[in-house]
Image: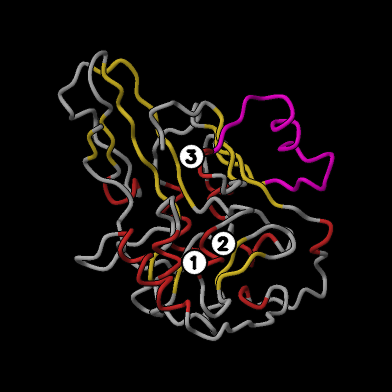
Amino acid sequence: MKHRHSHPDQQPDGVSRREFLHRSSAALAGAVAIVLILPEGSAAGISGAEYDWDRHTWVYVIDTTKCIGCGSCVSACRAENSVPEGMYRTWVERYEIPVTGEAFIDSPDGGEHGFDPVTSGMNVGKGFFVPKMCNHCRATPCTQVCPVGASFTTRDGVVLVDAEHCIGCGYCVQACPFGSRFINPTTHTADKCTWCYHRITKGLTTACVEICPVGARQLGNRDDPDDPVNEILATRRVQVLQPELLTRPQCYYLGLDMEVR
């Protein structure tokens, strides 16, 4: 499988993922565990006074058959969350599947500025776009390796980073199998998609869902029986990325091709 561009690999130079995780676990083995009791919503800067965490369980659905690769979602995310240039909380990949041979995958500038016409020179049998982001896994390895509890999961199922407590060690960046985390060069702390937590706890939807011109992205509440997302999950064939990892992603895909990882 050929990749022209994929999501930036933020692992330290010269250190493999396996070696990094080995060093991390060895260093933590003799350390005293630090447990932080974080108030709900502390990382998002909200009080929680008007929001009931126990009546929300957030999930996300992406329809790859609708995505046109315009990049509006990436731009909206950057503007809404002050994402540094060259970093991405969400990005879009283009897949070109030839009649014979391996798939060609690219994501120039995270897909933020759209895509040029097919340039792979292959006899393409089919092509499609796949938006990606943090999967907000239920069994997420990123929260398990954080030595100070700065990466945590809220009661309503959103994985967040408390920037006030994050020490920027990068363990969670290495542990994420989906490449959705990075160290913010401005704050020097772990950064990732938050499903616009500061918006959804105020009754708004995410910036990427709001901007999508074709409705390829949907955020929903599993605890609301009338939410359209629940009908999709109950009646449509939905899939998750890399299900064999058993991380229980809460980001579901429609029309996901076997070539997508």
**Residue 7 appears left or right of 90:** left
The three-letter code of the residue at mark 3 reads Gln
Q: In the image, which disc is placed on residue 81?
A: 1
Q: Judge the density around disc 1: few (<14), some (14-19), many (≥20) Cα neighbours within 10 Å.
A: some
Q: In the image, which disc is placed on residue 173?
A: none
Q: Quadrant of the N terminus?
A: top left
**Residue 235 appears left or right of 117:** right
**Which label's residue is closer to the chain start, 2 or 1?**
1
Q: Identify the residue at image location x=39%, y=43%.
A: 92
Of circles 1 and 3, which is in front? Answer: 3
Q: In the image, which disc is placed on residue 242?
A: 3
Residue 235 point in image, percent of width and height: 72, 24
Question: Which picture quadrant has residue 200?
Answer: bottom right
Q: Nearer the viewer, residue 226 or 190?
A: 190
Q: Are marks 2 and 1 in contact (CB under 8 Å)?
A: yes
Q: CA separation, marks 2 and 3?
A: 20 Å
Which residue carries the number 2 mark? Answer: 194
Q: Could you tell me which secondary element the residue under label 2 belongs to?
A: loop
Q: Identify the residue at image location x=27%, y=60%.
A: 16
Residue 255 point in image, percent of width and height: 52, 26
Residue 218 point in image, percent of width and height: 62, 42
The three-letter code of the residue at mark 1 reads Asn
